[in-house]
Image (cartoon, rainbow, N blue to C red):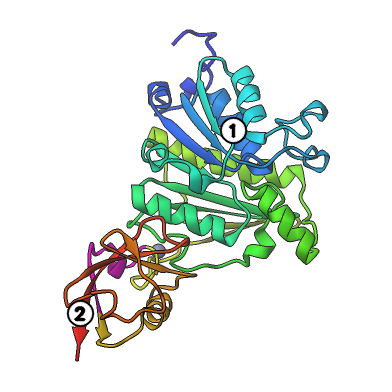
């Protein structure tokens, strides 16, 4: 390493191996307030491949805390502008971006990541990225903020508690205005007259810095990762750390869900609609559909109408699931 090279000062840290950053890929979901800081830190530190996912566009009210954006960027896609700015910060790295919803990004993008970092403000958004991280078995770092309050969680799929093992803090309170759901939420907001949420750059930088540091530690394999949740109150300067335990009955990572095929008992003559209601209650799903031999089953039909038999294999599809659950139908008389 050259003495005056770009990374020379961080390379003085014991255990630092810049070549690990040079080989790694990070997916950054949400490039608003916290995401801007995370992106800037990872890019300038030399994280070689960064993929930004966000489909929001830049507004004047973002500029007090979303440091990657300028007045002339208003109306432009956040992901695209952020990619340009990060490239300016460090021309030696590769930045890709998707100006689309995270759900529409191919799962191969998440699979290639060494770490997934999500700066999302909605419960559903966090829930979805959590299930994707479980599916591709990649470490996930979550963070959020509300005024002078913030939180962060580090998740190692199937090794530590996931987002759904023990949901803690009201998602509403942790919400912030930058999100890949921007346009969608704006429409919701107009309908529901949802209040705008307070957000300040100091908190974005603290939580963004904290999350970036956790990502670096994971990539470099140094220090102790956060065990595994922290809540920060900036007004009283208190960090509260909680070690959340894995929940064996967690709807996302519990034992049941790790099975490739789960048995589910149904009765002859039962309607698909009733079966769906029971499955939704059992698995905590929103509006599941059943897929059998490549076709979505009609809710009004009965088990017999749809030619389901004992030991038929069905897939449950739901917007809350990154991966369909495969069930083995057991018919009782
Ligand atoms: Zn879990």
Q: Is residue 281 above or below residue 38?
A: below
The residue positioned farthest toward the front in the image shown: 305
In the picture, measured across the screen, residue 138 lies left or right of residue 141, that is: left
Q: Is residue 254 on the magenta stretch?
A: yes
Which of label 1 and label 2 is nearer to you?
A: 2
| Front-most of residues 274 and 54 | 274
Residue farthest to the bottom, as pictured? 333
The quarter of the image that holds ligand 1 is: bottom left
Residue 238 position, x and y percent, is 66, 57
| Label 1 residue near ligand 1, CB within 8 Å | no
How packed mark 1 is, by other alpha carbons closer than 10 Å (few <14, some 14-19, many 20 or more), is many
> In this picture, which residue range is highlighted in magenta?
253-264
- What residue is drawn where x is 26% and y is 87%? 267
Provide residue 279's location: percent of width, then percent of height: 37, 76
Circle 1 sits on which residue?
Answer: 39
Q: Is residue 306 left or right of residue 68?
A: left
Q: Name which quarter of the figure residue 265 lies in.
A: bottom left
**What residue is pinned by disc 2?**
330
Whether residue 39 is visible, yes or no, is yes
Secondary structure beneath dot 1 equals helix
Q: Give whichever of 315, 36 is nearer the camera.
A: 315
**Residue at 25% over, 81% down:** 304
Q: Is residue 120 above or below residue 53?
A: below
Q: Left or right: 126 with respect to 107?
A: right
How many labels sit on residues?
2
Looking at marks 1 and 2 on the same chain, the residue that comes earlier in the sequence is marked by 1
Residue 111 percent coordinates (x, y):
36, 40
């Amino acid at each position: 390493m050259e003495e005056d090279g770009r990374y020379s000062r961080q390379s003085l840290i014991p255990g630092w191996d810049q070549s690990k950053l040079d080989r790694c890929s990070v997916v950054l979901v949400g490039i608003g307030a916290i995401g801007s800081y995370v992106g800037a830190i990872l890019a300038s530190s030399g994280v070689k491949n960064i993929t930004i996912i966000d489909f929001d566009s830049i507004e004047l009210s973002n500029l007090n805390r979303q440091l990657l954006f300028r007045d002339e960027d208003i109306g432009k896609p956040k992901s695209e502008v952020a990619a340009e700015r990060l490239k300016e910060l460090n021309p030696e790295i590769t930045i890709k971006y998707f100006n689309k919803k995270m759900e529409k990004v191919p799962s191969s993008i998440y699979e290639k990541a060494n770490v997934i970092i999500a700066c999302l403000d909605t419960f559903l958004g966090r829930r979805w990225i959590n299930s994707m991280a479980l599916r591709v078995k990649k470490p996930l770092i979550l963070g959020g903020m509300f005024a002078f309050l913030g939180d962060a969680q580090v998740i190692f799929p199937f090794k530590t508690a996931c987002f759904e093992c023990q949901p803690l803090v009201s998602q509403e309170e942790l919400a912030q205005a930058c999100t890949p759901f921007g346009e969608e939420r704006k429409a919701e907001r107009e309908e529901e007259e949802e209040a705008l949420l307070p957000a300040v750059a100091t908190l974005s930088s603290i939580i963004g810095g904290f999350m970036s540091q956790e990502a670096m530690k994971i990539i470099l394999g140094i220090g102790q990762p956060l065990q595994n949740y922290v809540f920060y109150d900036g007004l009283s300067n208190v960090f509260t750390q909680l070690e959340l335990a894995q929940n064996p009955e967690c709807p996302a990572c519990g034992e049941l869900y790790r099975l490739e095929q789960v048995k589910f008992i149904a009765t002859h003559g039962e309607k698909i609609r009733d079966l769906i209601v029971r499955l939704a209650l059992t698995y905590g799903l929103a509006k599941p559909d059943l897929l059998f031999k490549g076709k979505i089953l009609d809710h009004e039909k009965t088990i017999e109408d749809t030619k389901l038999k004992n030991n038929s294999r069905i897939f449950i599809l739901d917007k809350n699931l990154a991966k369909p659950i495969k069930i083995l139908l057991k018919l009782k008389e």
